[in-house]
Amino acid sequence: MAGHENGEADQHARENTVSGSPHSYVHGRSDSEFMRLHDQAAGLGSLLHEGTRYPPGSTVLEAGCGVGAQTLLLATNSPQAQFVSVDISPESLARAEELISGKGITNVTFRQADIGNLPFGTGTFDHVFVCFTLEHIPDPLSALGKLKTVLRPGGTITAIEGDHGTAVFSPDTPAAHHVIDCLVELQRQAGGNALIGRELEHLLLEAGFADVTVSPRQVYASSAITGSSEAVKSIFIAMIEGIREQVIAAGLANPEIWDRGIRDLHRTTEPGGMFCYTFFKAIGREKGAGS
Amino acid sequence: MAGHENGEADQHARENTVSGSPHSYVHGRSDSEFMRLHDQAAGLGSLLHEGTRYPPGSTVLEAGCGVGAQTLLLATNSPQAQFVSVDISPESLARAEELISGKGITNVTFRQADIGNLPFGTGTFDHVFVCFTLEHIPDPLSALGKLKTVLRPGGTITAIEGDHGTAVFSPDTPAAHHVIDCLVELQRQAGGNALIGRELEHLLLEAGFADVTVSPRQVYASSAITGSSEAVKSIFIAMIEGIREQVIAAGLANPEIWDRGIRDLHRTTEPGGMFCYTFFKAIGREKGAGS
């Protein structure tokens, strides 16, 4: 299965481009990745979406909706807002559309689009929402600039990203850090940045947004907190496990060291262990030309 | 001044022992360190002490009160509890006593004591509070065991520690990480553990405490948040700056690389920069022999 995921990722690396640069979704687009993304969204939904409610009648662009994991939360939390959810991958869009229509949700329109070349006019949207997307884009600052142009003066952007450098765990072993570092490096080689959470504040500022605020959203998981260690397994560790073949093919780790690191990560979910991770949620405002 | 601090730390390393092991307070005991500790306690007081209120008439042991920075908050927040604050350093105790009596606070008794050899009988205290102390102790598990014996059945322990591995910042440079790593290594050589926050859960469990819960307390600092970057300078960066001479003497960094790292850390407090850090607050209960 991991080999299948790897093959899909390679295929997408060849097919997709963002602003002319090669684009690979490092985690692949397999069924297991689909399940992982939905586990992630469901488990972290209240943590990440707290405070994100859009007024009735407002129009919101979701940039990089993927398989619709965040779309489901957005549309449910703001049932009277109108969402336009775009993604570069037709395959992901089809899954997202199936998910949303299957839930009987009617306030989302899907559209295939490249963030670097959006098919919308200046000031089209009241708000923009972008989650776990900037981390995969070679030039996130340019992407933010494009998103800014489709936002009306006074509108807001909400950007949510993780940062694998915030992962702190016990037992703490070099092998466990190594497998995380392998994902960071693989994502870097694919043009992304798995450490982008810490950069959100200056990226939004440099893109010209006003009133930029960032709130960290931290998860502490241990066997003392019901379900938390299971979430670490199904979200974070599954994400790392999913890139095994790519990492080995890229020469970033040998199988023995890799498997030891994965085993060590699993130990952080056992009694006495802990795993801590921080997401960053940034909000900025399009101040408009006149202000 | 840094040289003076270094000399003091060396002197204490020779004079003090904890459970027979050499004990050095890695940050020294200078006037500037006294000010830094009080800035830290004042700035982080509400974050770290939230939820820590002791009932009227209860007796609380503060283990490792240092110069009284946390004592002031403890005694003020729980004015009808009775505190016994101990420290291994007579010099620190004198400063703590001066601080507390100067504030007209009367519910604290100070006593010179080694956590490894406490002059209190079994079950003396209703609660134990220990903050920024376990990180400097060569055998924190043994220390927790000693603290457990002086706690009555049903009593609680509250342990608060930082973890320098949680420091995430932008701009993110190798030199800035290097100076933090130097402190971690220096503290390790002195018998401590600057990454102990992540270990609190299993340490309390292994020491035999029941109902162990840990809550992370995260700080996000940037120029967008009034006063936060100043706090990073006066608390965290000042702490790193204070060990310059020790680090260079120990051969952990050369002056040029050190100064570059410090300069880079200061850049995280400038507009567009950010600095994030997590403290861990653990609570456990002495379940008693019968339960």
Image: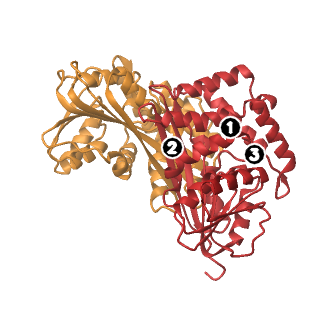
Chain colours: A orange, B red
Say which label, 1 or 3, has the lower sequence index.
Answer: 3
Residue B32's disc is 1
The image shows residue B170 at horizontal and vertical percentages of 51, 29
Q: Chain of mark 2?
A: A
Question: Dot 1: few (<14), some (14–19), or many (≥20) neighbours within 10 Å?
Answer: some
**Can the viewer see residue A181 in this picture?**
yes
Between marks 3 and 2 in the image, the one whose residue lies nearer the viewer: 3
Amino acid, disc 3: Tyr
Q: Is residue B1 left or right of residue A291?
A: right
The image shows residue B192 at horizontal and vertical percentages of 73, 47
| Residue drawn at the location 60% of the way across and 58% of the way down | B104
Q: Which residue is mark 3?
A: B25
Q: Which residue is mark 2?
A: A241
| Residue drawn at the location 20% of the way across and 22% of the way down | A119
Compute the Cα span from label 1 to label 3.
14 Å
Q: Secondary structure at mark 1?
A: helix
| Residue furthest to the bottom | B290
Question: Dot 3: few (<14), some (14–19), or many (≥20) neighbours within 10 Å?
Answer: many
| Residue furthest to the left | A57
Residue A140 image-quadrant placement: top left
- Same chain check for tags 3 and 2: no
